[in-house]
Image (cartoon, rainbow, N blue to C red):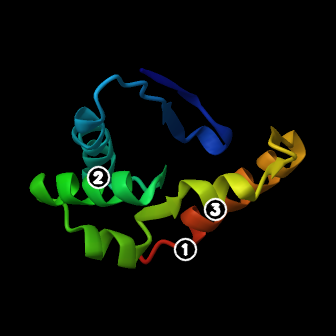
């Protein structure tokens, strides 16, 4: 489910992709993964549909994560899947250059914008 490695600046980086058969498990599994990082002081970016985003936020709150505070501090960034995909899709195909530019800007902005 996950792949980790060393990124630029010797920071540990981790990316997770979760394929699921039962949508009811998505929020629980994502919240489990995110809460570990958030509790360790790492930022998280979530790209999800509104329904999944709400369920993930509820699951994080159930794990004693103060979602409102994490969002306010910039530790938790929640983005709409359709809107985000629209930023780097052209004619229903991924534009690799747009994706790299958008993803890089998003990650850099998240790291700079944290209120810590």
Identify the residue at image location x=72%, y=61%.
105
For mark 2, does the 10 Å Cα neighbourhood hold few (<14), some (14 to 19), or many (20 or more) residues? many
Q: Quadrant of residue 75?
A: bottom left
Disc assigned to residue 83: 3
Circle 1 SS class: loop
Residue at 53%, 61% in the rendered image: 80
The residue shown at (36%, 51%) is: 52
Neighbourhood count class around disc 3 (C-alpha, 10 Å): few under 14, some 14–19, many 20 upward: few
The numbered mark at residue 113 is 1
Compare residues 105 and 82 and report the one nearer the observer: 82
Q: CA distance from mark 1 to mark 2?
A: 22 Å
Q: Please, which residue is most extreme toward the front here? A: 91
Name the secondary structure under disc 2.
helix
Name which residue lies at 55% across and 41% down.
Answer: 11
Q: Nearer the viewer, mark 3 or mark 2?
A: 3
* Label 2 sits on residue: 56
Horizontal arrangement in the rendering, residue 33 relative to residue 115 (left or right): left
């Amino acid at each position: 489910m996950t792949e980790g490695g060393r990124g630029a600046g010797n920071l540990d980086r981790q990316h997770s992709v979760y394929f699921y058969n039962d949508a009811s498990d998505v929020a629980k599994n994502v919240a489990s993964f995110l809460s570990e990082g958030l509790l360790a002081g790492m930022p998280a970016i979530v790209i999800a549909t509104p329904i999944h985003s709400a369920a993930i936020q509820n699951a994080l709150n159930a794990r004693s994560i103060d979602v409102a505070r994490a969002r306010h501090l910039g530790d938790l960034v929640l983005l709409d899947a359709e809107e985000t995909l629209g930023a780097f899709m052209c004619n229903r195909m991924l534009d690799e250059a747009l994706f790299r530019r958008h993803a890089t800007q998003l990650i850099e902005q998240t790291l700079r914008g944290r209120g810590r």
